[in-house]
Amino acid sequence: MTPFARFWIAVALTLTPGIACAQSPVVVGAVVSQSGILADLAADLRKALVLWQEDVNAAGGLLGRRVELRLLDDRSESGSVRALYEQLIRDDHADVLVGPFGSAATLGAAAAAEGGRRVLLNASGAARAAQRAGFRYVFQVPAPFSEYGTAALELARRMDYRRVLILARNDPVAREMADGALAASPALGLQATLEVYAPRTDDFAPVLGRARAIGAQAWIAFGLARDAAQMVKDFRRLGYAPAMFVAQGAAGTQFFKQLGQDAEQALGLSPWERTLRTRGNTRFVEGYVRKWSAEPTALAVQGYAAGKVLEEAVRRAGSLEQEVLRAALAELRTETPLGGYQVDHNGAQRAARPVVVQIQKGRREIVWPESFATAKWQLPYPRWEERRILK
């Protein structure tokens, strides 16, 4: 190339800066526990973000630019998260942020995002505290804990089970779920009573007695799989069967392993299922299994969904300018493998909802909402003398 030609190319690039910067990557920053006690739990978030990066780049990137992930390690110390996100903004010049693992760490990330006026997709912070009033740059992807009872209550109303007993393990997550269900009950025409039980309770007979006293038709419990299994053991021991039994812990594999056929027709609450017929879910599951040789978890789909929300918001905004992108996320309505995305004026999720699953012949089937159902629900919950051994 002659000096004269090189000169005019340089002039053209100077006059059209968009061409000069077209190849600079879009930096997406996140903090993920890669060492310490939370590393194994948080690993699926990192894997999902890496998968999304590969998928979006294969499709042409964002605004025609390659996506580059910058992942920092908080060493499982939530107290360091804010400073690490500030580093991503200040030193790494991250265009967009994705939140860390868990609600406690998300608080630190949100503080950095708000202070730096940088958009952050809250990928896993489902607690009320993680999405505070007044947030302008933080947008929640998973369903809030307070919404976990909504689907179960809607099913109870559909079956005309008006008297509801709500149980909560005495921990912050379960209490927030139960409080949300209790608050939602009157608007659905349900009479709800709340009972709180201590962690590692091994006898639910006293609660069962109170359930009988108030004529509870639906028993909805928030806690661990072992809690739900103990409830069923006490049901059988005392010959009790509410018309509808729902337990958060009944959605996990440990519930069935502890009970065998006694798990039949219990209803569980699940943030996501691999069989969910949401947009892109089959492709996500297949891609995750192919890349990582493992089944994706709810945390993995939350991380991937955060990337898909960002992808759609950037497409609609046509810009990475923070105020333009923030406005696009505030108005966005879309669907991801996790479910719907739509937020309120504080950036809190309004569209994503857990699903109700039921153990039917040893399989976990989605029964609510009906639009996603893989099987029809089976109610009432059968009495013990009516049960038959499955073959």
Image (tube, rainbow, N blue to C red):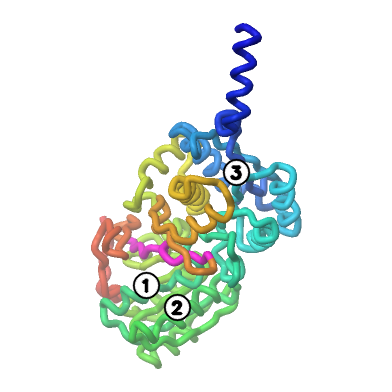
The residue drawn where x is 58% and y is 24% is 12
- Looking at the rendered image, the quarter that the N terminus falls into is top right
Q: CA distance from mark 3 to mark 1?
A: 37 Å
- Residue bearing the label numbered 2: 181
| Pointers 3 and 2 in contact (C-beta within 8 Å) | no
Q: Is residue 169 left or right of residue 108?
A: left
* Residue in the foreground of this view, choosing between 66 and 382: 66
Residue 374 left/right relative to 103:
left
* Label 3 or label 2, whichever comes before in sequence order: 3
In the image, taking residue 363 as reference, residue 166 lies left or right, namely: right
Q: Is residue 14 visible?
A: yes
**Can you name the residue that lies furthest to the bottom here?**
213
Query: Magenta stretch mostly in which secondary structure?
Result: loop
**Residue 84: x and y, percent?**
73, 50
Which amino acid does the dot numbered 1 rest on? Ala
Q: Residues within 10 Å of mark 2 (few under 14, many from 20)?
A: many
Q: State how many labels appear.
A: 3
What residue is pinned by disc 3?
A: 28
Residue farthest to the top, as pictured: 2
Q: What amino acid is found at the position of numbered circle 3 in the picture?
A: Val
Q: Is residue 141 magenta?
A: no
Cα–Cα span, label 2 and label 1? 9 Å
Foreground mark, 3 or 2, reads 3
Mark 1, Cα crowd under 10 Å, few <14 / some 14-19 / many 20+, is: many
- Residue 297 seen in this snapshot: no
Contact between marks 3 and 1 (CB within 8 A): the answer is: no
**What is the three-letter code of the residue carrying label 2?**
Ala
Disc 2 to disc 1: CB gap under 8 Å: yes
Residue designated by label 1: 152
Residues shaded magenta: 347-359
Label 3 crowd bin: few (<14), some (14–19), many (20+), radius 10 Å: many
